[in-house]
Image (tube, rainbow, N blue to C red):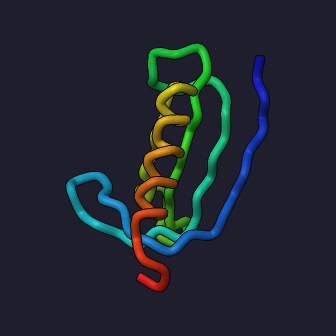
Amino acid sequence: MCTYATVCERVDGSAKGPGGAWFHVTDATVYYDHPVHAMAEHSLNIDLADPSRGPGARVAVELTRESAERLVGAITAALASAPDGV
């Protein structure tokens, strides 16, 4: 079943892309649907990109549901461990 549920968010950060070069990312697109490459029926797909630099300025991740849930927990724990304002 395709969900077509897509969430887009503005971000400010960096990603390492093709060829090992770092680039600025401005957009995050997150959706739960069929993966392109991951060996799973469905996956949480995350694209980090700078659309102004064309299609090459993009990093894509496809995670199983369980892996995505663990990643959310890890992100929450890492942010909670940092003092406010840091």
Seen from the viewer's position, the closer of residues 21 and 67 is: 67
Residue 59: x %, y % from top left? 42, 51
Q: Identify which residue is drawn at 50% across, 56% down.
A: 48
Is 69 placed left or right of 33 in the picture? left
Q: Identify which residue is drawn at 57% across, 27% down.
A: 65
Q: Identify which residue is drawn at 53% across, 49% down.
A: 47
Tag count in the figure?
0
Residue 1: x %, y % from top left? 77, 16
Is 15 placed left or right of 10 in the picture? left
Residue 6: x %, y % from top left? 74, 45
Residue 81: x %, y % from top left? 41, 64
Seen from the viewer's position, the closer of residues 73 and 36 is: 73
Q: Quadrant of residue 5?
A: top right
Q: Quadrant of residue 45?
A: top right
Q: Quadrant of the C terminus?
A: bottom left
- Toward the left, the furthest residue is 20
Q: Quadrant of residue 10?
A: bottom right
- Toward the bottom, the furthest residue is 85
Seen from the viewer's position, the closer of residues 41 and 68 is: 68
Q: Is residue 71 above or below residue 55?
A: above
Is 17 placed left or right of 37 in the picture? left
